[in-house]
Image (cartoon, rainbow, N blue to C red):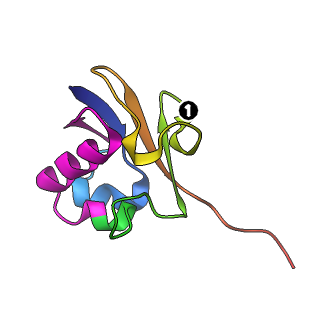
């Protein structure tokens, strides 16, 4: 199952400066493993050691936050679009 994965700018150095890559898998977790096999070091930037996405990384499948689906066990299918979006902190004191 090939899905399109949108890569945030800070991680593009790991994907040869590609903003969009393809990955295989039937779950988000499998997709992360496939991304890691293609682009070594990317998974540790996105996931905790247990495989769940880091707290400050938002993952969307077709614009739906996986936190409201099945997390890293969320099923994906051919043609889906996955977006990896780092949370942005800011504001004034």
Residue drawn 46% across the image and 64% down it: 54
Query: Please, which residue is most extreme toward the top here?
Result: 79
Give the tally of numbered discs. Answer: 1
Q: Say whether residue 16 is visible.
A: no
Q: Quadrant of the C terminus?
A: bottom right
Q: Secondary structure at mark 1?
A: strand
59 vs 22, left or right, is right
Q: Quadrant of residue 12?
A: bottom left
Magenta span? 20-43
Q: Which quadrant does the N terminus fall into?
A: top left
The furthest residue to the bottom: 93
Q: Residue furthest left?
A: 37
Please name whichever residue, 65 or 12, is drawn nearer the observer in this view of the structure: 65
Q: Residue at label 1?
A: 64
Residue visible at 33% across and 70% down in the picture:
49
**The magenta stretch spans residue 28:** yes
At a point 48% along the width and 40% down the height, the residue shown is 70
Q: Nearer the viewer, residue 83 or 20?
A: 83
Q: Position of residue 5 (x, y in %)?
A: 34, 38
Q: Nearer the viewer, residue 65 or 87?
A: 65
Counting from the top left corner in percent of width and height, residue 84 is at 44, 47
Residue 78 percent across, percent down from the top left? 27, 20
The answer to which quarter of the image holds residue 51 is bottom left
Give yes or no for residue 41 being in the magenta stretch.
Answer: yes
Position above or below: 8 against 5:
below
Q: Position of residue 33 (x, y in %)?
A: 21, 51
| Residue at the spot 27% in from the left edge and 50% down from the top edge | 32
């Amino acid at each position: 199952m090939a899905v399109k994965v949108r890569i945030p700018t800070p991680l593009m150095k790991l994907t040869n400066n590609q903003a969009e890559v393809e990955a295989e898998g039937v779950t988000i977790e499998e997709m992360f493993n496939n991304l890691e096999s293609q682009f070594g070091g990317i998974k540790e930037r996105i996931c905790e050691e247990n495989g769940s996405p880091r707290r400050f990384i938002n993952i969307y499948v077709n614009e739906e936050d996986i936190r409201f689906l099945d997390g890293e066990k969320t099923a994906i299918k051919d043609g889906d679009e996955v977006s990896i979006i780092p949370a942005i902190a800011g504001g004034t004191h």
